[in-house]
Image (cartoon, helix red, strand yellow):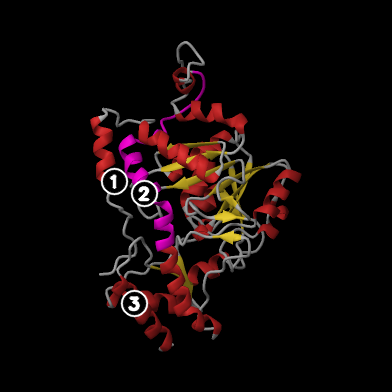
């Protein structure tokens, strides 16, 4: 069976994990955590980066830092994972879903302003497949309406929008280092703080409500419980695993891009003939080859393709079921406007295997079998 995903492994992960054990420092905020934090800060240009236990917990922190109150509203796309929504539900907000653009599968920036009410406090954007949302327009809307912006850049590490790294444009950015992501530590994530005034509050929130970070910097004589917090500290063992990959981040990125570009080249003639739709990367956006997907004409064809590929020992998978149609989506939010593309395009989309160091023979088989299926339509 050709797997849909194989977690990245570069060969030095165990060495660094053994080093963490030998240093007797495997809990949170150890040496490897600091290396990863500093790498993210320097590479992407954020004010402060902090590893977290997951991309979901990074989103939880961002939502709590937005200081939402019950009744406040958050605008977000419905085509996303539940973590994006859960974070704001946890903070007490009401979800307001808006439609997506069919070209990028990102939130439709032209539909946001009409969804704003006097209760709106946050716009949460999701950079699907590592391709940026239209951030200039979104940030302009946020500034004019005095709203905060949270970037769910779980899929966007190494991607950029007009020269700015995804996750560094809004007030907060959230990365995921789950095993399905381009860079992994099994379970893990990071929050990027782009407004300096939130750094101290974020440190306290992440450190169980204590000012422990300030204590270790010598800013206070002893640390104390000063506010609400939780434990979002990632184990240094996980950070050691991640550090091995960040050291060769460009190599991993280039390897994935080569696979993505091969798919694009092979399937572009079918898209030109109108048989399928392929991912769109708008001008000014640099993507990270997080995902390659095809959109067929309808749900029936997509399901037939998935079954055909499975019969040939190739695992291809669909993606999100729109949140506004889920029981929790109905309970915690509402859809503003018309669902023109969210459900229809989610029904058509299927993701192909794409991971670091794919076997060339496996890649060739995926391409050949996909072509065989499309030719049969």
Which residue, given by chain and number where applicable, does mark 2 sit on?
Answer: 245
x and y, in percent, of residue 124 in the image = 59, 48
Part of the protein shown in magenta = 226-255
Q: In the shown orientation, is residue 194 left or right of residue 230?
A: right
Residue with the mark numbered 1? 13
Position of residue 298 in the picture relative to residue 124 (left or right): left
Q: CA distance from mark 3 to mark 1?
A: 29 Å
Residue at figure coordinates x 51%, y 48% from the top left = 84
Q: Quadrant of residue 22?
A: top left
Left or right: residue 98 versus residue 241 is: right
| Residue 256 in view, yes or no | yes
In the orientation shown, which residue stands out farthest toward the right?
A: 144
Quadrant containing the N terminus is bottom left
Image spot of residue 87 (x, y percent): 50, 42
Decide: is 237 above or below 23: below
Query: Which x, y percent locates residue 339?
Result: 61, 64
Residue 325 seen = no
For this rendering, which residue is in front, 93 or 194?
A: 194
Q: In the rendered view, tell whether residue 234 sits above or below residue 212.
A: below
Q: Residue at x 50, y 83 (%)?
A: 269
Locate the C terminus and report the quarter of the image it occupies: bottom left
């Amino acid at each position: 069976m050709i797997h849909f995903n194989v977690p990245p492994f570069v060969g030095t992960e165990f060495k660094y994990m053994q080093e963490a054990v030998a240093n007797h420092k495997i809990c949170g905020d150890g040496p490897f955590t600091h290396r990863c934090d500093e790498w993210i800060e320097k590479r992407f240009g954020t004010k402060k980066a902090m590893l977290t236990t997951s991309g979901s917990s990074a989103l939880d922190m961002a939502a709590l830092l937005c200081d939402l109150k019950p009744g406040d509203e958050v605008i977000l796309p419905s085509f996303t994972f539940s973590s994006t929504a859960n974070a704001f539900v946890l903070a007490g907000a009401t979800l307001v879903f808006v439609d997506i653009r069919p070209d990028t599968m990102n939130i439709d920036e032209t539909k946001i302003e009409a969804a704003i009410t006097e209760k709106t406090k946050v716009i949460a954007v999701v950079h699907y497949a590592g391709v940026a949302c239209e951030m200039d327009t979104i940030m302009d809307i946020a500034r004019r309406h005095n709203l905060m912006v949270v970037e769910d850049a779980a899929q966007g590490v190494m991607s950029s929008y007009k020269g700015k790294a995804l996750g560094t444009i809004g007030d907060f950015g959230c990365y995921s280092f789950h095993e399905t992501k381009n860079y992994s530590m099994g379970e893990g994530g990071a929050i990027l703080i782009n407004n300096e005034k939130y750094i101290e509050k974020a440190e306290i929130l992440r450190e169980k409500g204590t000012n422990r970070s300030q204590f270790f910097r010598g800013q206070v004589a002893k640390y104390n419980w000063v506010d609400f917090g939780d434990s979002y500290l990632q184990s240094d063992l996980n950070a050691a695993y991640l550090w091995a990959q960040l050291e060769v981040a460009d190599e991993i990125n280039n390897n994935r891009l080569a696979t993505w570009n091969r798919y694009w080249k092979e399937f572009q003639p079918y898209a030109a003939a109108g048989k399928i739709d392929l991912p769109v990367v708008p001008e000014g956006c640099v993507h990270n080859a997080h995902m390659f997907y095809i959109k067929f004409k309808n749900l029936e064809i997509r399901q037939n393709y998935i079954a055909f590929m499975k019969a040939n020992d190739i695992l291809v998978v669909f993606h999100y079921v729109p949140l506004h149609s889920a029981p929790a989506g109905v309970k915690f939010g509402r859809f503003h406007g018309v669902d023109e593309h969210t459900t229809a395009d989610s029904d058509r989309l299927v993701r192909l295997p794409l991971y670091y160091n794919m076997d060339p023979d496996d890649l060739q088989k995926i391409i050949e079998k996909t072509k065989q299926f499309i030719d049969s339509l």
